[in-house]
Amino acid sequence: MRYRVVAVGRIRDAALRAACDDYLRRVQRYTRVEEREVKDEARILEAISEGSRLVALWERGEPWTSAQLADRTAQWERDGRDVALAIGGADGLPLPVLDRAEVAWSLSALTFPHELARVIVYEQLYRAYTIRRGEPYHRGP
């Protein structure tokens, strides 16, 4: 099983790119994660492997706690299917992506720049794996 984060656009801000790279390195100690940048929203579905579980990052999706995400990652691993996480650009995700998604995940009721959303996704994946292993990174409930 692997994760593929499919995101619209490149991260231009050096600090955000460094944060993404840092959390990617951290989470890759536990699981396979790759990043795929696409030019526009219309290309998101092309970047998702057939048979992958699609999780749409959407403001109207389900809000999950970090512990709930940890539980989901365990379930996804048991299922053995790859997981694609789709992050839209400034215009969000198009309807065909939302229709194809098995679940929509909301990071917050707030609106984030897509570059920052990507950092949050990587950090939360890392946190989920440390929660599952009882490591001290996560100090929340």
Image (spheres, rainbow, N blue to C red):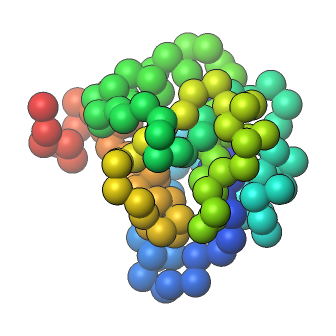
Task: Determine whether, in the image, residue 130 is placed left or right of residue 50.
Answer: left
Q: What is the quadrant of residue 40 in the picture?
A: bottom right
Query: Against 81, is 42 above or below?
Result: below
Q: Residue 106's x, y, as percent?
A: 43, 42
Task: Determine whether, in the image, residue 80 is placed left or right of residue 16.
Answer: right
Image quarter in which the C terminus is found: top left
Q: Residue at 48% of width from left, 36% of height from top?
A: 61
Q: Residue 86's x, y, as percent?
A: 64, 47
Query: Against 109, is 12 above or below?
Result: below
User: Closer to the camera, 82 or 96?
Assistant: 96
Task: Determine whether, in the image, residue 102 is placed left or right of residue 119.
Answer: right
Q: What is the quadrant of residue 112 in the picture?
A: bottom left
Q: Residue at 61% of width from left, 56% of height from top?
A: 92
Q: Residue 85's x, y, as percent?
A: 61, 43
Q: Residue at 65% of width from left, 19% of height from top?
A: 80
**Visible residue check, residue 42:** yes
Query: Against 120, is 71 above or below?
Result: above
**Visible residue check, residue 23:** no
Number of numbered discs overlaid on the protein picture: 0
Q: Residue 42's x, y, as percent?
A: 83, 56
Image quarter in which the N terminus is found: top right
Query: Against 24, is 97 above or below?
Result: above
Q: Residue at 29% of width from left, 34% of height from top?
A: 65
User: Closer to the camera, 104 or 74?
Assistant: 104
User: Closer to the camera, 11 or 100?
Assistant: 100
